[in-house]
Image (tube, rainbow, N blue to C red):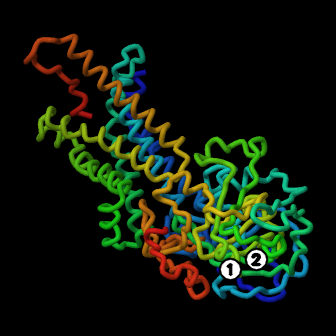
Amino acid sequence: MLLKRSSDLKYSDITPRDVYLNRRKFLYGLGLAGGVTLAGKGIANLAFPSTRAYASTKLPGIVKGQFSTDEKVTDPHVVTTYNNYYEFGTDKGDPAKNAQKFVTTPWSVSVEGEVSKPRKFTMDEILKLAPLEERIYRHRCVEGWSIVVPWVGYSFSTIAKLVEPNSNARYVAFESYFDKKQMPLWGRAGIELPYVEGLRLDEAMHPLALLCVGMYGETLPNQDGAPVRMVIPWKYGFKSIKSMVKIKFVKDQPPTTWNITNAHEYGFYSNVNPKVDHPRWSQAREVRLPGYFKNTPTQMFNGYGDQVASLYNGMDLKKNY
Amino acid sequence: MNRILTSKWAKVVVFLLCLVPLGIIVWEGFTGGWGANPTQFLEHATGDWILRFLAITLAVTPLRKIKILGLTQLIRFRRMLGLFAFFYAFLHFSLYLGLDQVLDFHGVWADIAKRPYITVGFTGFVLMIPLAITSTAGMVRRMGYRRWQMLHRAIYVSAVAGVIHFYWLVKSDVHLPLIYAGIMAVLLGWRVFSWFSDRRRKPARGAPPRKEPSTVAAS
């Protein structure tokens, strides 16, 4: 893979453009010589340049967080051009194209519900609530592909503790920003909007649950959920809500978008589980992007079982999918 | 128009045109167009072209029958168009087998048995195999036109299966599957309509079947 991480290397200067261009020439030669050869992961790595497809600012003072995997980090080009963000179109390439003009300043997140100190946090405040950590998590989509992303943020529990949830708070409901004017393709999404998600309180308070403000050392690109999102690494990607505007502590299990859309296929929990198939496809394996072969075995809780399995003690995970 | 269609270069031109989609798909591989998930891109790209070629193939007969268009000679290309639908279906299935399932035949059978969208897609593909095999003029002669025609009506099932396969596999945005469904409905609906109106025109039972143009077998 192109990406070798070392302490003083910035993500943006990982591979100089000319190197890519040379590689492409090489690839072209290869094609002429041998026709279409599917040389496995090689071609995918060679085929797309790592130029940044988004404008982001560097986030200062990032410290190394715990829980990081030492797996190979995915090329940022993949993470910024292959997105599920249905408000900006249902094709994987749509969000990168259509979210560029999405206005994310000013931004604030309202934290409310069963709490003793409800309040609104401006984006500036959110960025300063706690030291920003880099956490390299595996990210597994329900569709069967996965990436490894160096997210930036801090545990969601940090912000939760500030508003002091009361004893009625048993769940947390999240809501995305929604604006038909800025998201003209919303009608095609086939899902109810605004996008809503939810977690049980103990899930949300787990230190792995990340309130995320950046990736690859920079602020979040729009297509990846700018300016602030959740990242729940042991659950399928759609549980990690993007462009969050509201966090509500509630008594009862809140509705969640994909569960509303198709309850038979998408449950409230949606923990990554290779043994419980999606009704339409197997969840036993995944394709690690960018790659050709769906041959990476999917791990229980996406490999975070040591940390989170105890949250689900005694629960039938087939029933609570 | 029929003069252009019967010229000796027409088939060569159509053949090359049918290869253009493949050319574009391969070209996109060299320009980064396959994106982050090339397997999915290739499966979708080939899948789209199966449906398009099925629709084009099914459009041949209706277009011929609309007299004022003067396109009766379109029949010369029907076999080639159908075979290209099969060609793209073969690529599509191979991609699924080789990249998605990584030649795990056990997994393929499990998928076919368990997943309705795979079951229906696979059915559509398998039904095209005998059609491809019996597409030669010799086969038409050996089978007799009536029986050959009966068999080749299986393409209607493949077309419907293909659309259902697409409809069932998308997560929530069904716009494109519905567009294909609309096109197929028009093409198949036309056949139902013309079958009924033919019957009304010739109400006599046991009347000899209409004679088909000999160009079919000869093309």
The quadrant of the rendering that contains the N terminus of chain A is: bottom right
Is tag 2's residue or tag 1's residue first in the polypeptide sequence? 2
Q: Residues within 10 Å of mark 1 (few under 14, many from 20)?
A: some
Residue drawn at x 17%, y 42% is B138
Q: Are marks 2 and 1 in contact (CB under 8 Å)?
A: yes
Q: Quadrant of residue A31?
A: bottom right
Q: Is residue A2 visible?
A: no
Q: Is residue B25 visible?
A: yes
The spot of residue A290 in percent (x, y) is: 60, 71
Q: Which residue is mark 1?
A: A206
Alpha-carbon span between mark 2 and mark 1: 7 Å
Residue drawn at x 77%, y 88% is A6
**Residue B62 drawn above or below residue A68:** above
Residue type, numbered disc 2: Ser
**Residue A270 drawn above or below residue B129:** below
Residue drawn at x 40%, y 69% is B101
Residue type, numbered disc 1: His
